Amino acid sequence: MDNRDCDSDIVSEDISVVNRIVCKEIITERLEKKTQREGNQFVNIPPITSIDNALHIYYSNSEIGNKEISDLFGRLSSATISRLKNAVRKEMDRRGIHSYGLYKVNTAVAFGVWGIDVTDLEKRRKKLKDLNLQ
């Protein structure tokens, strides 16, 4: 048996082992990310009613309550509003952010938990104005 053949077999086996380890790490990482996303998405987030309304609520309120949440998402049941606010409260507790009002939640945290990207909304609003669609 030639020494080069033996070395190439060892190298092939090493590469195979490395590939399996890397694949396992990638799969584990993806599962962790999926779990994190699912952790924030236990509440079905309704669509916002309008870009202007969402931006107005975001910039005019440091904390939002039932009225602002209803304005943001449209008509919702009180149970849905409670689930939305509870998701935000959990994140606020995790970050150590306290609310000033008993029935209100931090606006910036709420928009983050609900996946509302204010920067993206501003770009979309600007684009609509540039196209004279708003």
Image (spheres, rainbow, N blue to C red):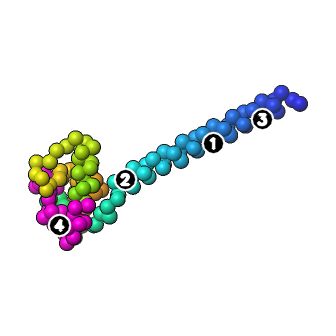
Is 27 above or below relative to 68? above
Q: CA distance from mark 4 to mark 2?
A: 23 Å
Amino acid carrying label 1: it is Arg
Of circles 4 and 2, which is in front?
2
**Numbered mark located on residue 20 in the image:** 1
**Looking at the image, is mark 3 or mark 4 earlier in the sequence?**
3
**Numbered mark located on residue 9 in the image:** 3
Task: Provide residue 74's location: percent of width, then percent of height.
Answer: 20, 70
**Looking at the image, is mark 4 or mark 2 earlier in the sequence?**
2
Is 64 above or below relative to 18? below
Q: Residue furthest bottom?
A: 75
Q: Please tell me whether residue 134 belongs to the stretch shown in magenta.
A: no
Q: Give residue 54's quadrant in the image.
A: bottom left
**Looking at the image, is mark 1 or mark 3 earlier in the sequence?**
3
Q: Which residues make up the magenta segment? A: 58-83
Residue underneath mark 2 = 39
Element marked by disc 2: helix
Of circles 1 and 2, which is in front?
2
Q: Residue at x 30, y 63 (%)?
A: 45
Classify residue 18 as left or right of residue 9. Answer: left
Q: Give residue 7's quadrant in the image.
A: top right
Task: Provide residue 98's location: percent of width, then percent of height.
Answer: 16, 44
Q: CA distance from mark 1 to mark 4?
A: 50 Å
Residue underneath mark 4 = 70
Amino acid carrying label 3: it is Asp
